[in-house]
Amino acid sequence: MKTKYHSTLTTPTPAVIEETGTLNQFYSFTQQLSNHKKVRFTGKTDEADNIDWNFRYRGRELTLQYNIYNGISLIPHSTRGNEAVEELASTLRAR
């Protein structure tokens, strides 16, 4: 008997784009988002081991994050952004 599973995520799900990502790759991803997806960054946080750049994509609040320990990730601000994160992560990984 086949069973179809429908998952309802209750927490925002980040997507790791590059586990061993460098700061140069992070800035390359910001350029790709700006130039190819017409993203405008709305806020930036720069700390010793972490950089967060916030933006909206298709009405969803997201963050592109660089962390010296975890690499580069896309993080949705709510569960409604999970789909947008997966779409963008796939695009950035392919470039």
Image (cartoon, rainbow, N blue to C red):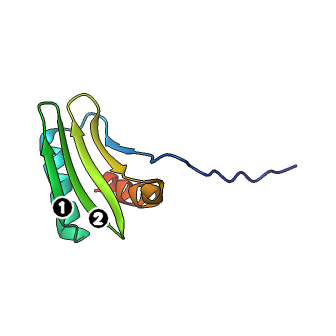
Q: Position of residue 89 (x, y in %)?
A: 36, 53
Residue sitting farthest toward the right: 1
- Residue at 14% x, 40% y is 23
Please state which of residues 23 and 65 is positioned toward the viewer in this rendering.
Answer: 65
Which x, y percent locates residue 6? 68, 54
The residues bearing labels 1 and 2 have C-alpha atoms spaced at a distance of 8 Å
62 vs 65: above or below: below
Q: Look at label 2 and name its amino acid.
A: Arg
Dot 1 falls on a residue whose secondary structure is strand
Of labels 1 and 2, earlier in sequence is 1
Q: Quadrant of the C terminus?
A: bottom left
Please tell me whether mark 2 sits on a helix, a strand or a loop.
Answer: strand
Report the number of numbered marks: 2
Q: Residues within 10 Å of mark 1 (few under 14, many from 20)?
A: few
Question: Can you give x and y, in whole percent of width and height, for residue 67 in the image?
Answer: 22, 35
**Residue located at (32% from left, 56% from top):** 62
Mark number displayed over residue 82: none
Q: According to the image, label 2 marks what residue?
A: 56
- Neighbourhood count class around disc 2 (C-alpha, 10 Å): few under 14, some 14–19, many 20 upward: some
Q: Amino acid at mark 1?
A: Thr
Which quarter of the figure has residue 35?
bottom left
What residue do we see at 21% from left, 40% from top? Answer: 66
Which residue is pictured at 56% across the width and 49% down the height? 9
| Residue 37 rendering spot, x and y as whole percentages | 26, 69
22, above or below 41, in the image? above
Image position of 79 (left or right of 77):
right
- Where does label 1 land, which residue? 42
Displayed quadrant of residue 45? top left
Marks 1,2: beta carbons within 8 A: yes
Measured along the vertical axis of the image, is residue 23 above or below residue 7? above
